[in-house]
């Protein structure tokens, strides 16, 4: 009888060690998944801040019928998808959204990379000239605003006055 109790205790001890190992392994696995997800989220947030725009100057070209905005890429990532950039410009408090269209046209904007190295990509440190074509530009407005919002990253906003005639 003493032998069967010892054998039963040994089997239960081995089973509990195996069960504890399995629970511990599963807990470690789930903990690593959580750490991996958090790390990936932090990296995505950090990467989003690598796109950063700064408006250097804005004015109006009445002859061409457009707002002219000079913007510098002060981030550390190049920008190649211009359609994901939202440009809001207009009279202060009444700015309108302009969408990217290489040909321009009312309600659209196009851009030219100044000093482009030939790749057609807006690299860090490069400045672009954005022409936002309005259907009509108010001549009596004293103050205008422009706001740039990239898909991911940090945009910029700027107030400017009507240029002297």
Image: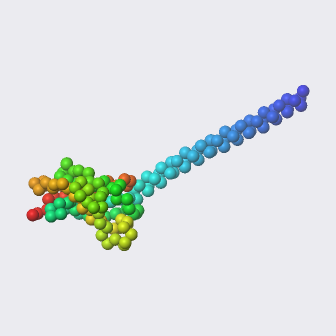
Residue 52, percent from left and from top: 35, 59
Residue 131 in view in this figure:
yes
Q: Is residue 72 left or right of residue 64?
A: right
* Quadrant of the rendered image containing residue 140: bottom left
Give the position of the C terminus as an image quadrant.
bottom left
Residue 49, percent from left and from top: 40, 56
Q: Is residue 79 left or right of residue 22?
A: left
Residue 54 in view in this figure:
no
In terms of depth relative to the viewer, which is nearer, 52 or 114? Answer: 114
Task: Please name the colour scheme applied to the rendered image.
Answer: rainbow
- Residue lying furthest top in this view? 1
Residue 59, percent from left and from top: 19, 62
In terms of depth relative to the viewer, which is nearer, 94 or 45? Answer: 94
Image: 28 above or below 56: above
Residue at the location (15% across, 64% down)?
63
Q: Is residue 58 left or right of residue 119?
A: left
Residue at the location (15% across, 56% down)?
137
Residue at the location (47% across, 51% down)?
42
Residue at the location (29% across, 58% down)?
101
* Quadrant of the rendered image containing residue 30: top right
In terms of depth relative to the viewer, which is nearer, 53 or 122? Answer: 122
Q: How many marks?
A: 0
Residue 88, percent from left and from top: 25, 53
Image: 96 above or below 124: above
Give the position of the N terminus as an image quadrant.
top right
Q: Is residue 22 left or right of residue 115?
A: right
């Amino acid at each position: 009888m003493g032998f069967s109790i010892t054998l039963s205790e040994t089997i239960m001890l081995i089973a509990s060690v195996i069960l504890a190992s399995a629970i511990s392994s599963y807990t470690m696995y789930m903990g690593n998944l959580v750490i991996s997800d958090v790390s990936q989220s932090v990296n995505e947030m950090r990467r989003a801040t690598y796109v950063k725009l700064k408006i250097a100057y804005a004015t109006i070209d009445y002859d061409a019928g457009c707002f002219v905005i000079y913007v510098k890429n002060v981030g550390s990532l190049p920008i190649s998808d211009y359609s994901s950039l939202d440009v809001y410009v207009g009279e202060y408090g009444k700015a309108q959204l302009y969408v990217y269209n290489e040909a321009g046209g009312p309600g659209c904007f196009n851009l030219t990379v100044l000093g482009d190295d030939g790749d057609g990509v807006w690299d860090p440190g490069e400045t672009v000239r954005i022409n936002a074509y309005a259907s009509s530009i108010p001549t009596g407005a004293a103050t205008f605003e422009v706001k740039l919002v990239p898909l991911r990253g940090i945009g910029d906003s700027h107030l400017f006055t009507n240029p002297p005639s």
